[in-house]
Image (cartoon, helix red, strand yellow):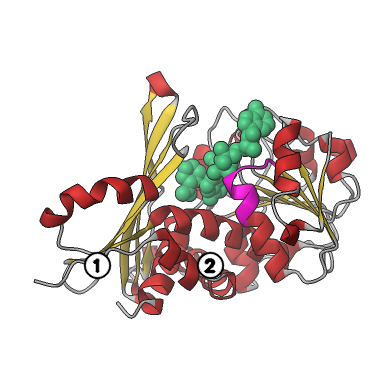
Amino acid sequence: MEEIKFISADQVGRVLTYALLNKAVERGLALFSQNKNCGQEDGRISKLDQPVRTVVSVPSKKASLVSMPVYIEADQLLVTKLVTFFPKNESVPKHNAIIAVFNANTGVPRAFLDGETITIRRTAAASVVATQFLDGETITIRRTAAASVVATQHLANGQPTVLAILGSGVQAASHYEAFCETFGTLQQVRVWNHKPEGAKEFASKDERRHNCVACESVEDAVRDADVIVTVTSSSSPIVMTQWVKPGAHINAVGACRLEWAEIDPNLMRSAIVYVDSREGALQESGDLFLSKAEVYAEIGDVVNGTKTAHRDKTTVFKSLGMAVEDAVAAKIVLDGLGL
Ligand SMILES: NC(=O)c1ccc[n+]([C@@H]2O[C@H](COP(=O)([O-])OP(=O)(O)OC[C@H]3O[C@@H](n4cnc5c(N)ncnc54)[C@H](O)[C@@H]3O)[C@@H](O)[C@H]2O)c1
Ligand SMILES: O=C(O)[C@@H]1CCCCN1
């Protein structure tokens, strides 16, 4: 029996760099859209199988358990993530995730990528688990920022100098890090939070955030910004059309439920809207459902060159997260650790 290896969030963090992740997520998004458009109805064997994820509700907590499987033939990856979203959690994270990686030839479990909360508890269960543990939360946190980076690389109008981040939680921090690392042209990052102390704390967290300014209103944060990232738990729109510079690019990352929205419906209807998965977005995005805005393309179609990047127009990338992003991130970790 193989020796049990426990791999901490720290180890995942060291191996899963944005330099590797941005490229891998870009390729994953492209493979996803390419595979769909090359016609499984012609009798061809599917090269990438990612069904729309299932969402199980826990109504008493307004919470959900999301199941996200994927098979990627090109990488011999057979992976599933299970992620919970408990928006009312205070003392433990709102998102918790585990990722299981199976051998794509035999179906035998290869690795089990563990979230932080479970890392604490797994010690007791170690004797019965003969797989490896990695950190699933760090993967969710970073691959989401990498997907926004990729969308921005393809849709922003020139090299961005001003970035606005709305929200000051976990995704705000990963987006700050990923964008500053990727876009050397950034001069200012404006942060807004619905509780002003959250934005102030974020901006002054350490000296590396010297380019970061806390803003008192969303309008102050987004005015003249080249790129906007919305990473809040808001259920109603926070970004209004008249505040946004024409030609700006917006990564709309929160609002993962049909009854939730972060973006003014008028803005959704007037912008060119890109998504990660068309089917997934139509099933889960309140920003799309409530505004009745049209989806122009998947971001993978833009990477593949089959749809236009309308860089001169105001664009929205509605991100909901996909299993293919988790799988390619898991591969970086397994390869990086020599597993
Ligand atoms: N698209 C994806 O792949 C993906 C992946 C992970 C998380 N998410 C989503 O991103 C969002 C942020 O996630 P996180 O992990 O950073 O959560 P978090 O709890 O760490 O941060 C949430 C932020 O929203 C703020 N907030 C809370 N209520 C608000 C309100 N009513 N109005 C405005 N702001 C409010 C909080 O102060 C905090 O700054 C969530 O909606 C989450 O579901 C998306
Ligand atoms: O893609 C994800 O991992 C998360 C799951 C919870 C809802 C938002 N997206």
Name the main secondary structure of what is drawn in magenta: helix
Residue 53: where, in percent of width, then height? 39, 46
Foreground of the two, 237 or 2: 2
Viewport quadrant of the N terminus: bottom left
Residue visible at 24% across and 50% down in the picture: 122
Three-letter code, disc 1: Lys
Q: Is 143 situated left or right of 191 in this image?
A: left
Which element type, helix, strand or loop, lies under badge 1?
loop
Q: CA distance from mark 1 to mark 2?
A: 26 Å
Q: Earlier in the sequence, mark 1 or mark 2?
A: 1
Residue visible at 84% across and 68% down in the picture: 158
Viewport quadrant of the C terminus: bottom left
Residue projecting furthest to the front: 207
Residue visible at 89% across and 50% down in the picture: 246
Stretch of the chain drawn in magenta: 167-174
Up/down of 282 relative to 290, above or below: below
Q: Is 235 situated left or right of 129 in this image?
A: right
Task: Read off the residue under disc 1.
Answer: 5
Foreground of the two, 327 or 283: 327
Up/down of 87 relative to 201, above or below: above
Is 270 magenta? The answer is no
Three-letter code, disc 2: Val
Task: Read off the residue under disc 2.
Answer: 25
Within the image, what quadrant is residue 102 found in? bottom left
Bin the neighbour count of mark 1 within 10 Å (Cα to Cα): few under 14, some 14-19, many 20 and up. Answer: some
Which element type, helix, strand or loop, lies under badge 2?
helix
Instruction: Tell me, yes or no, if residue 183 can be seen here.
Output: yes
State yes or no: Cβ of the residue under disc 1 lies below 8 Å from any atom of ligand 2. no
Residue projecting furthest to the top: 60
Residue 331: where, in percent of width, then height? 39, 72
Residue 275: where, in percent of width, then height? 60, 52
